[in-house]
Image (cartoon, grey):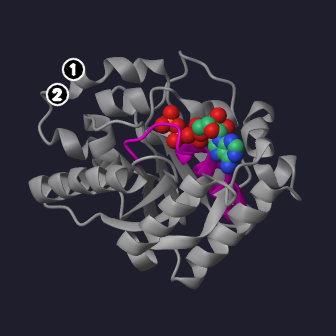
Amino acid sequence: MKKICFFNLKGGCAKTTSIINIVSYLAMKNNKILVVDCDMQSNLTSSLINYDMYRPGIFQVFTGEKDINEVIIRVKDNIDLLPSSLLMSTLEPRINGIYGREFILQRALNKLHNNYDYIFYDSSPSFSLVTTNAIVASDNIIVPVQTEYFAVEGVKLLLETLNYIKEGLNIQTELKYLFATMHDTRNNLNTIQYENLKKVFKDKFLDTYIRKNVALAESPIFKQSIFEYKPHSNGAHDYELLIKEIESKGGF
Ligand SMILES: Nc1ncnc2c1ncn2[C@@H]1O[C@H](COP(=O)(O)OP(=O)(O)OP(=O)(O)O)[C@@H](O)[C@H]1O
Ligand SMILES: [Mg+2]
């Protein structure tokens, strides 16, 4: 079972969009997947099922009110979801005093009844106790980056955060890949930043980039991945290519 967290302190860089589409592709190839929504915005949850603030989910797993197996929902063939809600915004003060508070999610996941090929965590764009729990419970981190202003600086800050967590908690989670999202090769700034990222992060920065594609923004409205909504779009093409490059480099 591979455990991967999509992480970037910068908001709106396509963490949730990337998870939805990558997971959908892997599920079509018969992989069994659990997606864990660690973001109070609950965009991942809303992209898969109708949002319901009162549905028990990750909040109750963190507080210990529910067993993880009780609140996981089958949302599609081969895809299970641990849903989030806005209640997550009230979580931190409640778990602050818990012994081993950075390991709550990992402890809960150790009790999973189902066997998955992959667990993917969607995180919020902030350094919080919940984000730390997601990183602790992951083997690898994948970072979607927008090739805009301060792209390299943003990722360096993120790496500092990751190292701080790793040293403080003595965990082995690794930055595995970065890739460019909403990329436009006709935009000079995008091209310069893409090249800067390649220079700094070398092989970890994937060659494949995800182009801007309106179908990627539309598909969650219909609770569909890009492969269901518009399988012949640039978005579907790019995410398929991205996964193939990851597989060619040894996988997630
Ligand atoms: N390749 C793309 N082309 C066009 N729009 C995109 C693309 N990727 C993502 N978007 C849109 O950009 C916005 C931000 O994407 P998304 O919500 O996936 O980012 P995020 O990193 O999860 O954000 P947050 O940090 O708030 O959780 C969304 O409206 C999404 O539909
Ligand atoms: Mg998101």
Q: How far is the residue under mark 1 from the one under mark 2?
A: 5 Å
Task: Examine the rendered structure and indicate whether residue 1 appears above or below residue 20.
Answer: below
Whether 14 is among the magenta residues is yes
Q: Amino acid at mark 2?
A: Asn
| Residue found at x 49% / y 53% | 145
Query: Hey, what amino acid is under mark 1?
Result: Pro
* Residue span colored magenta: 8-27
Left or right for 159, reference 205: left
Residue at x 42%, y 36% (from the top left corner): 124
Residue 172 % position (x, y): 23, 66
Residue position for label 1: 93
The mark found on residue 62 in the picture is none
Indicate the secondary structure of the residue bearing disc 1: helix
Residue 199 lies in what quarter of the image? bottom left
> Residue 159, position in %: x, y?
27, 57
In this rendering, the answer to whether 90 lies above or below 222 is above
Inspect the magenta stretch and tell me whether residue 41 lies in it: no
Residue 96 bears which disc, if any?
2
Mark 1 near mark 2, Cβ–Cβ under 8 Å?
A: yes
Of residues 173 and 12, the one drawn nearer to the viewer in this rendering: 12
For the stretch drawn in magenta, the main secondary structure is: helix
User: Is the residue marked by circle 1 packed among few (<14), some (14-19), or many (20+) residues within 10 Å?
Assistant: few
